[in-house]
Amino acid sequence: MNQSCKNCGHTFHGNFCSHCGQSANTHRLNFHSIWMDIRYGIFHFNDKIFYTTKQLLYRPGHAIHDYIEGKRLKYFQPISYVIILATFYGVLGHIFHLHIVIDNGEVDPVFSKLGLETINDWILKHYSWIALLLVPLFTISTYLAFKKQGYNFVEHLAINSFLTGSGFYS
Ligand SMILES: [Zn+2]
């Protein structure tokens, strides 16, 4: 049965609008629909985060290859993935008072003058920004090193985002 999309007006057949992707099953807003939307949003988000993390831990090469080749629906977008994971690591580090900079007696005098505690706090607070700055740096180096593999710069960006997000470089 053909129907008219409530979002864009396109006439389509099936469960989703072939033009904008909205579901054919769009009911009137009520408490039930809000609850379903929230559940869908949260579960979808969690599913993608967990699926991506699991794949990156157990089969990073395959996962990244799949994603680049176009198998993307189940994966979290790589750059968003780094931002979320790095923020998460930063918060965890803050909660558990992780020490990224450790005083082993050989600390650079500039560092000890500033106070290790301060530096540590600063790193944890800005962890997602640091990760975001590191990704382009890693990308430039892998792009130059593996240019012959045929991946373009943005594909390298995706590879490095996934690797950074899954903690590969730390
Ligand atoms: Zn539509």
Image (cartoon, rainbow, N blue to C red):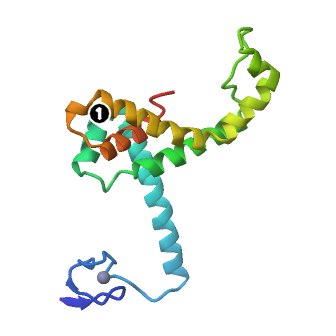
Q: Is mark 1 within 8 Å of ligand 1?
A: no
Relative to residue 3, is residue 82 drawn left or right?
right
Q: Nearer the viewer, residue 146 or 54?
A: 146
Quadrant containing ligand 1: bottom left
Question: How many discs appear?
Answer: 1
| Image coords of residue 20 (percent x, y) | 30, 77
Please determine whether, in this image, residue 126 is positioned above or below residue 75: above
Q: Nearer the viewer, residue 74 or 146?
A: 146
At mark 1, the secondary structure is: helix
Q: Which residue is mark 1?
A: 61
Relative to residue 39, is residue 4 drawn left or right?
left
| Image coords of residue 88 (percent x, y) | 59, 43
Q: Quadrant of residue 93?
A: top right
| Image coords of residue 94 (percent x, y) | 71, 37
Please determine whether, in this image, residue 82 is positioned above or below residue 146: below
Q: Nearer the viewer, residue 43 or 77?
A: 77
Number of residues whose C-alpha sits closer than 10 Å to that of mark 1, classed few (under 14), some (14–19) or many (20 or more): few
Rendered residue at 75%/20% (across/down):
110
Rendered residue at 53%/74% (across/down):
35
Name the residue type under label 1: Gly
Relative to residue 26, is residue 88 drawn left or right?
right
Q: Nearer the viewer, residue 46 or 109?
A: 109
Can the viewer see residue 57?
no
Rendered residue at 43%/33% (across/down):
138
Can the viewer see residue 127?
yes
